[in-house]
């Protein structure tokens, strides 16, 4: 990576922000592991974590993980399936007509399945998850983009029964709603998690 895009308004090179400006220690995260100084110009994506890093799926319900798939799938199924049924009922259903509707039906079914999986993930985390207190360390771009703007993943340090761990949680939004260095309550179950506390800013 030639420049640092996240938390680095001056676009310093990675090697220029590898040491803590206060104690000089080599940086392993956005917060110095020795003196606790927050380094606001180091990119989350450029760091080697000082603790294990777990990629999590978001267990929180939102428009993009449940509303949009159901809406998208409903539109495709609601239009293509009745039309195919009408063609079949009238006896005018050559192979190319059926073949034309199959992709639309499959897209609708897959979208509905995605929404259902997100819903059951939420129920599982809510029922079986364990609440942990975490500290927000930073953000990085997700591979998903909304209106050509990358969604954000949040990096949180948690105290777990297996020791300290970082989790990287997709937020499903392009904003950074939680202040860096703030505490958040996270409900964690396996590789699924959701933030429980009230968002600080939009």
Image: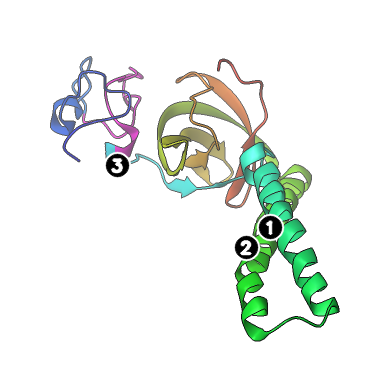
The segment highlighted magenta reads 26-45
Residue located beneath label 1 in the image: 76
Residue topped by disc 3: 48
Q: Earlier in the sequence, mark 3 or mark 1?
A: 3
What is the x, y in percent for residue 200? Answer: 58, 16
Mark-to-mark CA distance, 1 and 2:
7 Å
Residue 40 is a magenta residue: yes
Residue 177 vs residue 51, the one in the foreground: 177
Contact flag, marks 3 and 1 (Cβ < 8 Å): no
Distance between mark 3 and mark 1 Cα atoms: 43 Å
Residue at 71% over, 52% down: 75
Does residue 123 belong to the magenta stretch?
no
Quadrant in which the N terminus appears: top left
**Tag nearer the camera, 3 or 1:** 1
Residue corresponding to mark 2: 107
Q: Along the polypeptide, which appears first: circle 3 or circle 2?
A: 3
* Side (left or right) of 19 relative to 183: left
Magenta segment, principal secondary structure?
A: loop
Q: Where does the image place residue 142, in percent across and percent down from the top left?
A: 43, 41
């Amino acid at each position: 990576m030639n420049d640092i895009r996240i938390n680095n308004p001056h676009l310093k090179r990675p090697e220029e922000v590898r040491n803590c400006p206060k104690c000089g220690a080599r940086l392993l995260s956005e917060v110095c592991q020795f003196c606790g100084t927050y380094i606001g110009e180091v990119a989350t994506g450029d760091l080697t974590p000082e603790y294990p890093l777990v990629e999590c799926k978001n267990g929180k319900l939102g428009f993009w993980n449940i509303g949009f798939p159901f809406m998208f799938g409903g539109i495709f199924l609601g239009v293509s399936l009745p039309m195919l049924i009408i063609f079949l009922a009238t006896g005018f259903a050559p192979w190319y007509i059926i073949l034309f509707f199959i992709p639309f039906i499959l897209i609708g079914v897959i979208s509905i399945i995605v929404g259902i999986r997100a819903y059951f993930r939420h129920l599982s985390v809510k029922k079986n998850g364990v609440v942990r207190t975490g500290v927000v360390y930073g953000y990085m771009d997700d591979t998903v983009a909304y209106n050509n703007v990358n969604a954000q993943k949040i990096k949180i340090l948690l105290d777990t029964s297996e020791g300290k761990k970082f989790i990287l949680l997709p937020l499903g939004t392009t904003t950074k709603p939680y202040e860096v260095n703030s505490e958040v309550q996270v409900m964690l179950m396996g590789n699924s998690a959701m933030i429980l506390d009230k968002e600080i800013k939009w």
